[in-house]
Image (spheres, helix red, strand yellow):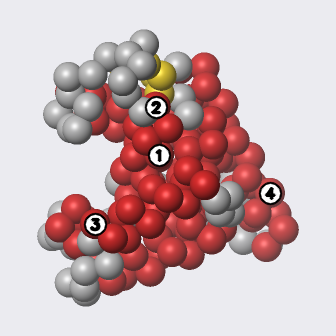
């Protein structure tokens, strides 16, 4: 489980940023090698991805300082990941037939969902296509705060672990 405790004596921001950055690279490999975009010409701009990852940590630190929290849980990381990945759009393409907005929004949502903890359930089976479409719409046309996404992802995780389809 990924939690971020900025006040801990053993907290090393650089190490934590790199862990999350590496997980985003693995998510990209997943969607391009095994996922919906396996045959597409996509690449990830690692500089933009690093800026997005650092921005996640910057927002979480500000939120923690404002709220007097010690630890940022996986829901907050997931929420801010969706915010920043959908905003900065690190996936790029040379193929004009691919909707890069859609690819980046899908990547942001999947990356956020992968931070959650599921008890013997594959989250894909528990998220309805209607709700997924709603998330895709929001990431493209609305500016939802990372805090709002974090709250939602807390509830999504609870519902999925209870066997409820979202």
Q: Which residue occupies 76% across, 63% down?
A: 63
Give x and y (percent) for residue 71. Answer: 63, 65
Q: What element carries label 2?
A: helix
Q: Nearer the viewer, mark 4 or mark 3?
A: 3
Spatial CA span between label 4 and label 2: 30 Å
Q: Which residue occupies 47% across, 45% down?
A: 105
Name the one closer to the observer, 155 or 90: 90
Q: What residue is disc 4 on?
A: 62
Give x and y (percent) for residue 41. Answer: 32, 16
Q: Which of marks 1 and 2 is in front?
A: 2
- Decide which of tag 4 and tag 3 comes sooner along the chain: 4
Q: Do the residues labelled 4 and 3 touch (CB within 8 Å)?
A: no
Q: Residues within 10 Å of mark 1 (few under 14, many from 20)?
A: many
Q: Which residue occupies 37% across, 50% down?
A: 110
Quadrant in the picture for residue 87: top right
Q: Do the residues labelled 2 and 3 touch (CB within 8 Å)?
A: no
Q: What residue is disc 1 on?
A: 105
Spatial CA span between label 2 and label 3: 20 Å
Give x and y (percent) for residue 137. Answer: 50, 58
Name the one closer to the observer, 108 or 70: 108
Quadrant in the picture for residue 37: top left
- Decide which of tag 4 and tag 2 comes sooner along the chain: 4
Spatial CA span between label 4 and label 3: 34 Å
Q: Is mark 1 on a helix, strand or loop?
A: helix
Q: Is residue 161 visible?
A: no
Q: Are marks 1 and 3 in contact (CB under 8 Å)?
A: no
Q: Which mark is residue 23?
A: none
- Decide which of tag 1 and tag 2 comes sooner along the chain: 2
Spatial CA span between label 1 and label 2: 8 Å
Q: What residue is disc 3 on?
A: 129
């Amino acid at each position: 489980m990924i939690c971020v405790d900025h006040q801990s004596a053993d907290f090393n921001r650089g190490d934590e940023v790199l862990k999350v950055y590496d997980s985003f690279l693995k998510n990209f490999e997943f969607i391009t090698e095994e996922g919906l975009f396996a045959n597409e010409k996509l690449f990830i701009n690692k500089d933009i991805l690093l800026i997005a990852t650092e921005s996640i940590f910057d927002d979480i630190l500000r939120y923690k300082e404002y709220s007097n929290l010690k630890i940022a849980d996986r829901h907050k990381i997931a929420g801010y990941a969706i915010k920043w990945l959908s905003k900065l759009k690190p996936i790029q393409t040379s193929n004009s037939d691919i909707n890069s907005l859609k690819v980046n929004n899908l990547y942001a949502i999947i990356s956020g969902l992968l931070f959650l903890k599921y008890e013997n359930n594959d989250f894909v089976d528990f998220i309805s296509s209607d709700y997924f479409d709603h998330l895709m719409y929001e990431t493209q046309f609305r500016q939802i705060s990372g805090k709002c996404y974090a709250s939602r992802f807390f509830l999504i995780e609870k519902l999925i672990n209870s066997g409820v389809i979202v």
